Image: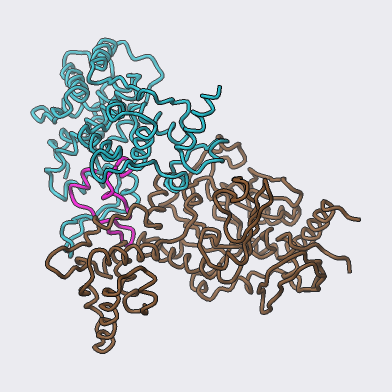
Chain colours: A cyan, B brown
Amino acid sequence: MISERDKARYPFTTESADYVKKLRIEVADLITEPYKPILKRAEERIRLALLKPDDLAPQEHDPSIEILSFPTSIMLMAYIDNENVKRRYAVAESKGFSKKLKTESLEKVIEIAQGTYYWNIKSKGQNLRETYEIFLHFIDYIKNIKNMNDLKWKLTNRYLKDGYVEITKNEATRLIEEEIQRKILKKTKNRKVEPPKALKEILETIKLITMEKTVFETFDTPSGIKVENMPPCIKKLFDSLSAGGRLSHLGRFTLTSFLVNTGATEEDVMNFFKSASDFDENKTKYQIEHISGRKGGKTKYKPPKCDTLKTHGLCFSPDEICNRIVHPLTYYRLKMKALKKK
Amino acid sequence: MNSLKDFKKITQTFIRSKFSEYYIKNKNNILAPSSIESREFGFFLFAENIVIRHKTFQKTSELRNFITNIVPSDVYHSAAYYNDPEAPMDKKGWKGSDLIFDIDADHIETECKKKHDTWSCIDCKFSGLGKPPQSCSKCGGFKFNQSTWMCNHCLEKAKEEILKLIDLIHLDFGINLENIRVNFSGHRGYHLHVDSQQIRNLDTEDRKEIVDYIVGTGLDTNLLDIWDTSGKIKSIGGLSPNDPGWRGRLAKRIIRIFSDSDKETLKSIGLKPQAIDSILKLQMYNSNTNQDTSWRMIKGTGKHTWNILIQKAIATESVGIDTVVTTDIHRLIRVAGTLNGKTGLKAMKIEIEELPEFNPFKQAIAFDGYETIHIEEAPRFILGDQEYGPYKNVNEKLPRSAALLLLCKKRAYPVRN
């Protein structure tokens, strides 16, 4: 059963959405006195999500305000014209929910996944491998591991039988987090219309929040790297990251190794990666140091060959030069050479 | 004197007339995909470089009549379902796609390719056997003409792969056998279609994850919890053939390597003499005691040996699919019951239970009767119950199916009787 408290804690659930629908509140109502706390809490959600994501936690003392503040923040974010900011918001909200969800019972986690996202998920019951408590159908599983960089998430490394993947409760909440994030991003897609007058003031406030330095990292192209000389595959990874997107593990590796092999310093690469929405300073530093050969095996890694990139779906719109080469670094060198001749 | 172009034209016209006769007689064997009205159809015509795309049909009979009238060299349908299959690509409105797999002998390493496949450099005409190199060893060029042949051995290998694939799709991914359809391509391989509501909406990235599982990409043996470093006896942890997923597959394969391999095979895998000794002793012990459990604890073998065995097991269990085909959600794939323009053989549906015994060189034959042709060059091959060739610059009267194979393969041209 989803209780009143659950609805406030998890306002993304179907049950909460139904509750909100029944109230039939109009946008104009939000600036009237009785509803003001909702708008205030919505603003707070956004402020915390963008500036202090770790402090974003459900407030359970007034469930109805808490429940209503969530769709209100989403509506507000839809008027913000900045993908990077939206992604940060979605990441923070979904992380907050999953943190709380981890403390819930197995039954509750399963109930939410089934009830809100229609996952094909079930408790495993008695089994030999007790660490895994849940069976999740592979389709729901693969839909939610796209942003996971750790190899432990790869289907290849999982127990898979009769269409079901074995996962732990914590893994289930992590996957629900991805699902929530995706849904928030979908709902905050740009509204091409002018915001209602009632929201003008609060939207101005939110815009100011997004201007704060920590939210909008300026991104620097590593010095000396000629973006126009990059092969299409690297360019695509580069653009995606520059726009605040996420890369797969191999995508990250490919881009980093390409950059360090074409003369970028570790610091350059580090600064560049800061613009990624799931930037984790320690992890990124570790990766860069290993790829550049300063730590670990002391070998400087090269990006994968074209063949490997093709296998992994990382070869995008190959051009004329691509037909002549077997390695992305050759592409860059050929173009640099041509440039010097000019 | 006829020019080369004339020969080409004569051959094309000839093949087309035979295809036409075939379709008039056999059009009811053409199998339309499910939801035919949502599919795009594509056709290659005999006249060079003519492709008809974005065609739709409301009923199977329309498709059959169209093929019989147009007589194309090859017929394809989209794996995808569209709102408007006739619209240009970006306006079709993608509604979903079957999950398809292509197993082609081109992607499988076989020794015989060095005998029957050839390549020649487009720039300097330098040529060789087997697969083309990355760059021409004479002029450094990158572009090659390839001439491939279909042989029994290559196709048997492809069949082994498709059987492995069915196993994975059914047992691991839990797809019902009634949702799995297998077709022989009419040339060098097999296609597997999964036609089920639940997989239709998978996007390219989702399909890539499935591909990685089937190929074994990203398999990290550390994560499979294989290593057990306790004590002096190294063993592969609790790896059991009953485990789901890759763990179980690796365990089963390693057991097979232990029980089936002789000394030479073990040596060829790269095992050290001490490990080989230990394995052979265990084989003896197992056969004497009728036991099969102690394979986990082979003395004198360290992590190095286990690693070799695991790598070997991964390589053997991995299925040789064309990864690009599966991840392409707009792919066109051959229609079953039509002829393959590269061979004159039938692309055909095979019942899964009949697959192990399926012989494409007998069952995919489309023609009867005889034809006289001039054969420029062809290797030895088997078709039906007969063995042919090798040929070089001879006129031969052959069963029509063999003649068409050589004509379609551009190794021969028709001779007027």
Residue at 26% in and 84% down:
B286
Residue stretch rendered in magenta on the structure: A145-174
Residue A166 in view in this figure: yes
Q: Residue furthest right?
A: B1
Quadrant assignment for the C terminus of chain B: bottom right
Q: State yes or no: residue A148 in magenta.
A: yes
Q: Is residue B207 magenta?
A: no
Q: Residue furthest left?
A: A61
B60 and A290: which one is in front?
A: A290
In the image: residue B203, left or right of residue B238: right
Residue B325 on image: x %, y %? 51, 51
- B198 sits to left or right of B37: left
Residue B162 on image: x %, y %: 48, 65
Residue A14 in picture, x, y percent from top left: 26, 38
When the figure is inspected, residue A24 is found, relative to residue A316, above or below; the finding is above
Residue reaching furthest to the bottom: B288
Q: Quadrant of residue B284?
A: bottom left
Residue A225: quarter of image: top left
Determine whether, in the image, residue A298 is placed left or right of residue A59: right
Q: Residue at x 28, y 18 (%)?
A: A27
Q: Nearer the viewer, residue A300 or A222?
A: A300
Rendered residue at 27%/30% (across/down)? A90
Asked if residue B361 is positioned above or below residue A95 in the image, the reply reads below
The N terminus of chain B appears in which quarter of the rendering?
Answer: bottom right
Place of residue A17 in the rendered image (x, y in percent of width and height, measured from the top left)? 25, 33
- Residue A14 visible, this angle: no
**Figure check: A26 above or below B363:** above
Figure disc tally: 0
